[in-house]
Amino acid sequence: MFKEQVQRFLSGSFVATFIILNLLNDEILTEARTSNNLKVQLPHGGILVGRHLSTHKGRHMRAFMGIPYAQPPIGELRFKPPVPYGSWKGEKLVIKDSFKCIQRDPFRRDQEVEGSEDCLYINIYTPEKPNISEPLPVMVWFHGGGWECGSGISSFYGPDFLLDYDIILVSANFRLGALGFLSTETLHSPGNYGLKDQQEILKWIQVNIQAFGGNPNSVTIFGESAGGASVTYHMLSSKSQGLFHKGIAQSGTYFNPWAQPAHKGVAAKRANKTALLLGCYHKNSNDWPEIINCLKQQSAYNLTAIVYDLFEWDTDPMIPFPPVIEPDHAEAFLTVHPRNQLQPHGLALPLMIGATSEEGLLKTAALLNLPEILYEFKTKFEQILPIVLYYDHLPEKDQHDITEKLKYFYLKDGHNYDKYNYQNITDLISDGWFLAGIDEYIRLRMSNLLTQAHNNAGPTYVYMFEHKGSASFSELFHGGREDYYGACHAEELQYLFPIARELFVSAAPTNSDLKLRDLMLQLWTNFAWNRFV
């Protein structure tokens, strides 16, 4: 389905040791304090002092890491929209990553909780000597991780590759999990705080990016998975209008089932369960002020650790705290379901969108290699599939009918899949979690562009990533190196960012990997420069 659409839309576009470290740190600090080139004065008068870095090809750049864009969302600011950081006097040293937003990673089945609630910071990377004199386009990266985990840290999403080109890169942290998305479906905690953090980042960029040599009128937001879905949400939200000018949605839209707004009552139910798990539950489940006040007294660690207790089977539903439809109020990010609302400002913007060919390995890599999970999935398929594919809110008969149709289409030979015969079950998850939603988003966008004769319609570029490189994200999702399958979810990230050096230490890129990396970097940065239009 989606792959056929890709071929149609692609026509006319593109296919797509300790002492030494201490000495170096001392040198960096000295350099940062003495080089005027590393000082940027913001419009409010405060000064940021960064550091020098080099790209993988040796190009010099400036890095400003750990810039606060909002007040720490702690205490009374928990479960509230971000409050701008404000001004300061004098110099602020910004030469290292901030903490990640506190999180627990279910995709890698991590048991530990890491990060801090004080995490609303961005990194900005600029060429030291651009090849042109005009202000540079800005590319703002929203990481994936299901709005549950991930960050904008330099070891994952640094500038090592992209800054070989004349752009400014901004990578960002935003609130995750319950702290970022818990909603009572009332004004007591309307939710969507992580998306509102992203919006605050875009506002900050509009005010400040010129001081870094950036063009506030040429801002591209791009992201993968939940980051890609975030891009489409900003293309929908009227409050994001004017804050950016192009979007790249990689493996995610708001039509993907895990990214759609929670069905009515679901978010409140999970807020109640969270309260129950933390001893904040009140007999009157509508006494939200008391519940929220109690949750504000809980540690960020406890609020994050309980996420595994919200899963109904294995690590599903994949995202316990998705975006929500808020009550209508002044600070609302989303008040209408995306299916019931056009995106007039989003339709006018250029969009690049795509997916990997085996997205579903995000789930099936583990499913096929953890025997107890596979056995349960096969023997309780009728009960589990509605949870995994997000149709368990429907009446039982409808659930049954949908399950039977899916079995007939994908599993004609029954449950004979295993780690050596996996394509059918991987296709089921790929289509259900990713490709169907992306396909629907493209169809709707193109339909609106054509039927409404939109005078300022933005172009749409579609890609499919199928490359099998020397390393695969299926390893991280418990696939095992010896059982390498194909182009897994998130696979394209290692060709845009240095993430592979952190995650796949022993995997040396092949010549074809390097050629693809160069091609993708050119395509992504050309898009930011409007060179496709």
Image: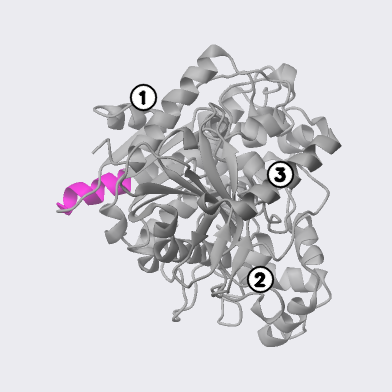
What element does badge 3 sit on?
helix
Q: Amino acid at mark 2?
A: Pro
- Identify the residue position indicated by label 2 in the image: 72
Asked which quadrant contains residue 342, the reply is bottom left
Residue at 75 percent of width and 69 percent of height: 274
Quadrant location of the C terminus? top left
Asked which quadrant contains residue 378, the reply is top right
Residue at 56 percent of width and 19 percent of height: 468
Q: Amino acid at mark 1?
A: Val
Q: Amino acid at mark 3?
A: Glu
* Outermost residue, top side: 511
What element does badge 1 sit on?
loop
Residue at 79 percent of width and 79 percent of height: 297
- Identify the residue position indicated by label 3 in the image: 27
What element does badge 2 sit on?
loop
- Closer-to-camera residue (11/492): 492
Could one spot residue 314 in this view of the protein?
no
Q: CA distance from mark 1 to mark 3?
A: 45 Å
Residue 474 horizontal/vertical position (percent): 66, 29
- Residue 334 located left or right of residue 118: left
- Residue 151 located left or right of residue 528: right
- Closer-to-camera residue (342/286): 342
- Identify the residue position indicated by label 1 in the image: 15
Circle 1 or circle 3, nearest the eye: 3
- In the displayed structure, 231 sits above or below 416; it is below
Circle 2 or circle 3, nearest the eye: 3
Point out the stretch of residues depicted in magenta.
443-454
- Closer-to-camera residue (57/90): 90
Residue 329 horizontal/vertical position (percent): 45, 81
Q: CA distance from mark 1 to mark 2?
A: 43 Å
